[in-house]
Amino acid sequence: MIKMRRRNDSFQISPEEFKKRIREHWDKPEIRGPNTSRFGTEAEMAAWKNFFSKELGEKRLRILDVGTGTGFLSLSLAEIGHEVVGIDLAEGMISSARKIADDRGLDLDLMVGDAESLDFDDDSFDVVVSRWVLWTLPDPEKAISEWMRVLKPGGRAYEFGVSRAVEMDGLRRQIRENLRFFPNIVVEGKKLQGIQSRYGNDLDGEGLEEKLPLHHIKPDSNAKEIEFFKKYGFIDLTTTLMVDADMHRMKQKGKTLQHKLVCGNYDEIMTYCLNGRKPMRC
């Protein structure tokens, strides 16, 4: 197999092949779900809009949403008056986001794009946002360096990730992974498909997903993100728990037996916001 040529030597496939697998996974209609099923509730969206209104103020800003998925952050920001560009690696996700935007009467740029290689000029955005994306990347450092490049001096980057309040040991995690498909048999009547990673079948037979540099099951993921933000020049770093937004998200997902078996109680997994500022030029 071709070994990855960047920083993470534990990968056994090329970054290009890995991204191809990710793109193919998120392009599946059953993964995106019908229409707005992966979009979030109105209550959840209201909590995020309230957060951004307080953070960003009333001035209309040009914002880049990296890894927009079905457009949750992009549309939330557009609805409070900002000029938004949303990119995602998967065309299927962009198609879903465009449909939701049309349904909500919103006009914004949604396009296919690579988080690690942004097709935008230097100093072209006031704000960069990204939700639950860095941990999926084979080279998150490259993505963070790109955010710094495309931000205007004084601009801010907001990265939203998830971490476990209580870390699971290896055995507990394996049990949870096996239980993931239990409801498919007992509750949903679906036949067992086997243990799979988030991107379908385990990519190299060695738990490739968990080897990602910022995989969220690793206890030091947030510390590494802070390290990378500092490395590429971000200043005034702060980390905030998204308690209000999480309350709506976890209550919704916590209704399913599968979620309770795999993830546990509402308060075991929390969303945090890491944000930093690009220095002004002298």
Image (cartoon, rainbow, N blue to C red):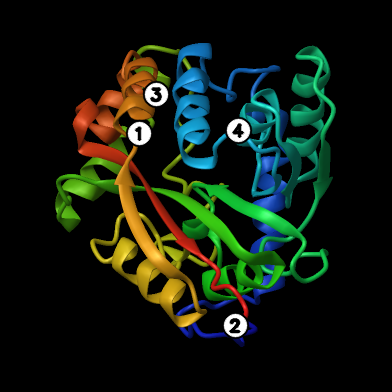
**Residue 127 shown left or right of residue 107 in the figure:** left
Going by the numbered disc 2, the residue's amino acid type is: Met
Going by the numbered disc 3, the residue's amino acid type is: Arg
Sequence-first disc among 4 and 1? 4
Going by the numbered disc 4, the residue's amino acid type is: Glu
Residue 182 visible in the displayed image: no
Residue tagged by mark 2?
4
Q: Nearer the viewer, mark 2 or mark 3?
A: 3
Residue tagged by mark 1?
180
- State if disc 3 and disc 2 touch (CB < 8 Å): no
Seen from the viewer's position, the closer of residues 127 and 262 is: 127
Assign a secondary structure to mark 1.
Answer: loop
Looking at the rendered image, the quarter that the C terminus falls into is bottom right
Sequence-first disc among 3 and 1? 1
**Residue 269 shown left or right of residue 213 in the figure:** left
Q: Which mark is drawn over residue 249?
A: 3
Sequence-first disc among 3 and 4? 4
Could you give the CA–CA distance between mark 3 and mark 4, rounded to whole angstroms? 26 Å
Sequence-first disc among 1 and 2? 2
Residue tagged by mark 4?
58
Identified at 67% across, 54% down, the residue is: 126
Identified at 32% across, 17% down, the residue is: 251
